[in-house]
Image (cartoon, rainbow, N blue to C red):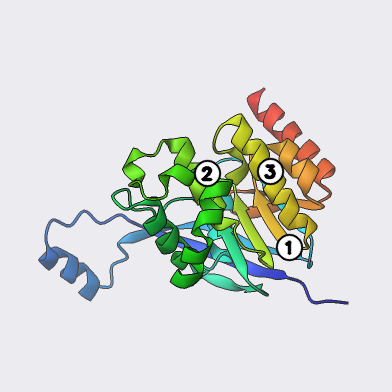
């Protein structure tokens, strides 16, 4: 039996919210010397655990503020957990906050190289792939144009094309399928399905429950940083939907 592609074991993440209203460095230093606690703890995640098998698609659902995006950033190695551990085997393609590293004053080509480097690829590799990336994104005529001239839809297409221009072992996907216009959403969904069919292990977060039901083999519902349920997508979606309807009533 092969080892899991992803192991999330007792993961917690603490944010420290300052409650200090000191007006000077002197007052702050006095607080430190007195060992006064000047912050409040907010646990965005609290003891979350699950495993994802190689080639499995695992969906995560929950309300806004549940900790879903924080969990994805930990799995993508953007931030470390405060407690617990995460093991991800193989190459990772994180699709989180697409385009967050773009420089609007630089050209499409310059951003392809820079953004790809942030994702762990070499500049030479990104230059060699630039034509294919903009061709998929329907931006062939904009390769040498500064990004400030791009529309929001063009930026989304470019970012998605860069992020998916590899065959990763693990995909970490946060609401990517909801960006862009309808035509782009169809194309991005098809590309995602292609990567899944090639055997990539996928963790996907989405408020689009139909996407989770269609793509995922298992799903998890989290709320306030804690696991509520894990099981089949149909079971988890049904329970989550009932909970949302009851809260409205």
SS of the residue at dot 2? Answer: helix
Residue 25 placed where, x, y %? 13, 65
Q: Pick whichever of labels 3 and 2 is earlier in the sequence.
A: 2
- Label 2: how many Cα within 10 Å (few below 14, some 14–19, many 20+): many
Decide: few, some or many residues near mark 1? Use Cα within 10 Å; few <14, some 14-19, many ≥20: many
- Examine the rendered structure and indicate whether residue 86 appears above or below residue 23: below
Q: Position of residue 77 (x, y in %)?
A: 53, 68
Q: Residue at x 64, y 44 (%)?
A: 188
Q: Residue at x 21, y 68 (%)?
A: 31
Quadrant location of the C terminus in the rendered image: top right
Write down the quadrant of residue 165 in the picture: bottom right
User: Quadrant of residue 189 in the image?
Assistant: top right
Residue for badge 1: 200
| Residue drawn at 67 percent across, 52 percent down | 204
Q: Earlier in the sequence, mark 3 or mark 1?
A: 3
Residue 234 appears at what percent x and percent y?
Answer: 83, 41
Mark 2 → mark 1, Cα distance in angstroms: 21 Å
Closer to viewer: mark 2 or mark 1: 2
The front one of 47 and 88 is 88
| Quadrant assignment, res 227 | bottom right
Q: Are marks 3 and 1 in contact (CB under 8 Å)?
A: no
**Does label 2 or label 1 sit earlier along the sequence?**
2
Q: Residue furthest right?
A: 1
Q: Which residue is mark 2?
A: 157
* Location of residue 205 in the rendering, given as x and y in whole percent from the top left corner: 64, 48
Q: Is 101 or 12 nearer to us in this picture?
A: 101
**Image vertical order of residue 51 relative to residue 189, above or below:** below
Q: Which mark is residue 173?
A: none
């Amino acid at each position: 039996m092969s080892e899991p592609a992803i192991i999330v074991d007792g993961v917690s993440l603490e944010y420290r919210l300052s409650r200090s209203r000191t007006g000077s460095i002197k007052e702050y230093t006095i607080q430190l010397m007195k060992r006064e606690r000047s912050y409040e703890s907010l646990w965005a995640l609290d003891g979350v655990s699950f495993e994802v098998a190689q080639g499995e698609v695992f969906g995560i659902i929950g309300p806004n503020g549940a900790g879903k995006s924080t969990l994805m950033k930990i799995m993508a190695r953007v931030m470390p957990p405060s407690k617990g551990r995460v093991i991800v085997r193989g190459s990772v393609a994180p699709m989180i906050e697409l385009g967050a590293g773009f420089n609007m004053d630089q050209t499409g080509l310059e951003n392809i190289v820079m953004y790809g480097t942030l994702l762990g690829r070499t500049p030479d590799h990104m230059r060699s792939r630039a034509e294919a990336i903009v061709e998929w994104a329907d931006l062939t005529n904009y390769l040498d144009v500064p990004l400030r001239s791009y529309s929001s839809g063009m930026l989304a297409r470019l970012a998605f094309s860069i992020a998916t221009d590899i065959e990763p072992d693990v995909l970490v996907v946060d609401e990517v399928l909801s960006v862009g216009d309808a035509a782009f959403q169809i194309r991005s969904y098809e590309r995602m399905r292609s990567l899944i069919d090639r055997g990539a292990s996928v963790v996907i977060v989405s408020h689009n429950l139909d996407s989770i039901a269609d793509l995922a083999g298992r799903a998890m519902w989290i709320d306030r940083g804690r696991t509520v349920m894990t099981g089949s997508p149909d079971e988890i979606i049904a329970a989550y939907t009932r909970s949302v309807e009851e809260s409205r009533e």
